[in-house]
Image (cartoon, grey):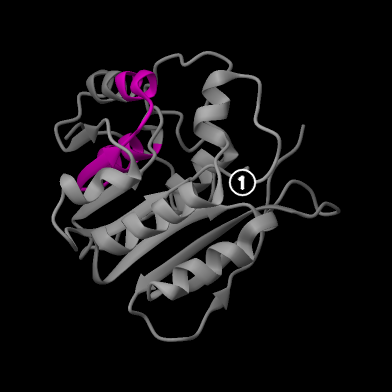
Amino acid sequence: MADRKFPACEFDENLLRDVKLPDAGKSYRPTHATTLLAWYSRPSKSHKKVLELGCATAAVSAYLALRYPIEVTAIEKDENLFKLAQQTVQANNLKNITIHNITCAQVRGFFHAESFDMVIANPPHHLTNIPSPDPLRRTTRTADFQTAIEFIDATAFLLRNRGIFVYILPPMHFSFWMTEFTKRRLQPKRLVPIYGSEKSNAQFILMKGVKNGGIGMIVEPPITLKTV
């Protein structure tokens, strides 16, 4: 693993500055959601095997693989993004990360049940809006409720008992996500609301949960993103 220096655990909007990423064009670039997921997905010493669902260019997976002594696996359904994710692995000289060109619905054919200590995801946030005219954005950032359920089912299948899952989600459909997680004994345990400014509504919700965890949840102090 490369010897790299990264920011401390305080949230930093430039957290991914040391990760070398290929140019995916204006249609797909790392966003605040990407950086927030990387920041909130800190594995503990017992989390040795981490999987990212829908990794895109693998910015989050690469950050975790560079920073922590873990084995990272990632999946990405879009073939072009999958190829860019492979470029990210090569550019950062990563030996502890593997990328698969599959969908969430296909994970049962590639992995054993309960194979991972942590599962993380930044799933498509637009579940009911009009699809983007941009083909790549339409594929990666717009979905339907069935696609969302495939993310949740994959998490439940892949995560070991008492394993951790971390998602970044839109407030708009948060009740849907909560309902579907708890149906599968994926218990949300910690939430962090994310604001664009002190006067705006929340843009995202970071969520950390435990498979087969007990009832009880903490809402952590909010994060307000810097504005220029």
Vertical order, 163 against 151 (above or below) = below
Chain part drawn in magenta: 60-84
Give the amino acid at mark 1: Leu
The residue most toward the right is 199
Q: Which residue is at 37% across, 22% downward?
A: 20
**Image mark count:** 1
The location of residue 151, given as percent across then percent down, is: 41, 52
The location of residue 64, given as percent across then percent down, is: 31, 43
**207 displayed left or right of 65:** right
Quarter residue 210 falls in: bottom left
Looking at the image, can residue 118 be seen? yes
**196 displayed left or right of 112:** right
Q: Which residue is at 34% across, 22% downward?
A: 79
- Looking at the picture, tell me which residue is in the foreground, 71 or 228: 71
- Looking at the picture, tell me which residue is in the foreground, 93 or 88: 88
Label 1 sits on residue: 127
